Amino acid sequence: MFLDYAEINVKAGDGGGGASSMRRESMTPRGGPDGGDGGRGADVVLRADKQLNTLLDYRYRQNYKAEPGQKGTAVNCTGRSGDHLYLRVPPGTVIRDLETGEILGDLLNDGEEMIVARGGKGGWGNARFATATNQAPRRADPGEPGEERRLALELKLIADVGLVGEPNAGKSTLLASVSAATPKVADYPFTTLTPNLGVVQLSGNRSFVMADIPGIIEGAHEGKGLGHQFLRHIERTRTLAIMIPGDALEPQEEYDRLRRELQEYSEELGTKHHCVIFTKADLLPPDWPEPRVNAPDAWGQFVISSVAQRGLDPLLEALWTRAAQVAEAERQLDEGDPEPWRP
């Protein structure tokens, strides 16, 4: 089962209390205070793990509590600190504080970590309070409480190319044709119920990741259909492929409708680089002109048949080139290049 949103409660460990103890040894009268400090409470840490691709684990358990620090003991012994609690999430998980609405972080890469709740400090033992005028203090402080938070975990899949289209536009068929992914393919709408990822392998050890989301219908940005639940997964893609069946009655209307839904969902999606792919070319008569739409913002238009394997090679080369160019522009921006490549 695919789950891309979860809410959890996390509680870091409380700090251990300090000890109030007086040194008691033979031949050592008035030994003085020797109470040790309490141990530090454990942190709650989220760690990205590429072996995961869903937040399903957090559907069945929502409360997580880290280990507290141990109390200090005599002979100036500090209590043991708690072991940190690590929670695994898929790369691409956005963490948000539900009480404040603040986005705390975004785990993109495998092994990346973020502390979401810090453990409390241990309390001081009475040995810390000894002074020249107070040589036998009995005071020992309790440990600090650990942080407690209610978090929202939101998964946004990481892919190079995102496939966008109405139901039965041929998205899953294309993904199955060019990668090892096995999305459900059938001749009725909404066969895709969850996002699918596939790795497209090209010659020269080149590859890119393609994402297919459920079909988008008019009003998707308002919650209609299934696609709205998963539009977030194509926000991270480097380029979009808007797919229209070659035999569509009004291809221009379909293109404009899809673009409008993307723009209504988010400004970022509305301005993302995209191309137009006309699918199901095998259904067109041999003398039929190639379909085209008025799409001045698109960087290319392609006509393919996934079933007949027509037009796939030039399409995949173009998608790889565009994804590589956008990746290079992102790298230049990260490095502060004053004149990065602009698509």
Image: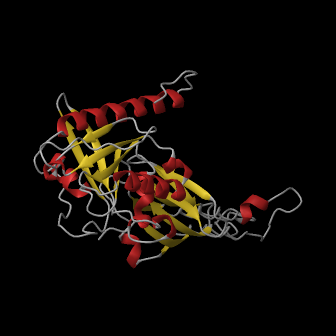
- Residue drawn at x 40%, y 60% as measured from the top left: 89
Residue 176: give x, y in percent of width and height: 17, 53
Instruction: Point out the image quarter for the C terminus.
Output: top left
> Where 161 sits versus 137, above or below?
above
Q: Quadrant of residue 145?
A: bottom right
The percent coordinates of residue 315 (x first, y second) are: 24, 37
* In the foreground, 45 or 23: 45
Image: 82 above or below 258: below
Horizontally, is 163 left or right of 95 in the view? left
Labels in figure, total: 0
* Figure coloring: secondary structure
Q: Is residue 210 above or below residue 190?
A: above
Q: Quadrant of the N terminus?
A: bottom left
User: Residue 99: x percent and y percent?
Assistant: 65, 70
**Residue 240 shown left or right of residue 22 in the figure:** left
| Residue 40 coordinates in the image, percent (x, y) | 59, 61
Q: Is residue 156 visible?
A: no
Q: Furthest-right residue in view?
A: 133
The residue lying at 75 percent from left, 65 percent from top is: 30
Q: Can you tell which quarter of the image residue 325 is in?
A: top left
- Considering every residue shown, the one lying at the far front of the view is 287
Which residue is at the front of the view, 133 or 90? 90
Residue at 50% over, 72% down: 8
Q: Is residue 251 visible?
A: yes
Tell me which corner region of the image, top left, top right, bottom left or bottom right, holds residue 201.
Answer: top left
Q: Nearer the viewer, residue 59 or 199?
A: 199
Q: Is 340 located above or below residue 39 in the figure?
A: above
In the foreground, 114 or 24:
114
Residue 193 shown left or right of residue 113 in the figure:
left
